[in-house]
Image (tube, rainbow, N blue to C red):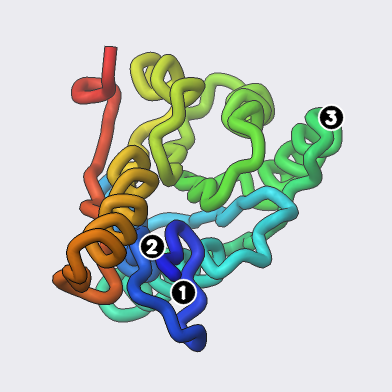
Amino acid sequence: MVFYNVDQPNCSRLSFVGCDYVKAGRIAAGLAAFASKDEGKICILSSKVANLPSFEDRVAGFREELSAHYPHMEIVENTLLDGDQFDCYDTIRKIIARHPDICIIYLVNPGDYSACHAISKAVGKRKIRIITNDLMEEQIPMLQSGLISATIDQEPLRQGSLPLEILFNHLAMGIRPPANPVYTRLSIIIGQNSPA
């Protein structure tokens, strides 16, 4: 068995191919610090399907990095968003009303990137930096317009194809994978280097 995207380390598996989610969270914290000059208030948002290890590990990495290196940055909200667009906007509007000085929103595992539009609508003309994970087609215009400040890409094509390659090499040629787990490369994407 080769797992991808979500690991099951307690299983007897040949390998795991996917993201180092803790490291991705640490990178997101570094981006948040860079975007806010090492100080400010942060809101962590995610969709309600966020009880995934990817969410928990990213948030743990984010918190660890802030705690270790950025004492003047504070997480003031950690909220799960409902899938409904109206409820999403209403929740974000209430968060912004409670914390009008939030400068960074870390959108961890969005089920729907319309949350970015809801954030923009809720803050009006005030600039809030949004940091996301993954690089989906619907994010590209948001990166290019500056709605999303940065996203952390995790090589989704390699993440999908490498498990099949590992299985083929093992079954057809008896070759074991070179590493277990195999982590994908994490890249920072901003508007200027986003795909056209």
Badge 2: how crowded within 10 Å, few (<14), some, or many (20+)? Answer: many
Q: Is residue 9 visible?
A: yes
Q: Is residue 38 visible?
A: no
Residue at disc 2, secondary structure: helix
- Distance from Cα at disc 2 to Cα at disc 1: 7 Å
Amino acid, disc 3: Phe
Residue at 26%, 66% (x, y): give it: 170
Amino acid, disc 2: Gly
Q: Which residue is mark 2?
A: 25
2 and 1 marks in contact (CB < 8 Å): yes
For marks 2 and 1, the one nearer the N-term is 2
For marks 3 and 2, the one nearer the N-term is 2
Question: Which of the 4 image quarters holds residue 158?
Answer: top left
- Distance from Cα at disc 3 to Cα at disc 1: 29 Å
Q: Which residue is mark 1?
A: 60
Residue at 84%, 29% (x, y): give it: 86
Amino acid, disc 1: Ala
Residue at 42%, 38% (x, y): give it: 129
Q: Seen in the image, is 66 located left or right of residue 69?
A: right
Q: What label sits on residue 86 in the rendered view?
A: 3
3 and 1 marks in contact (CB < 8 Å): no
Relative to 159, does residue 58 appear above or below in the rendering? below
Given residues 17 and 27, the one toward you in this image is: 17
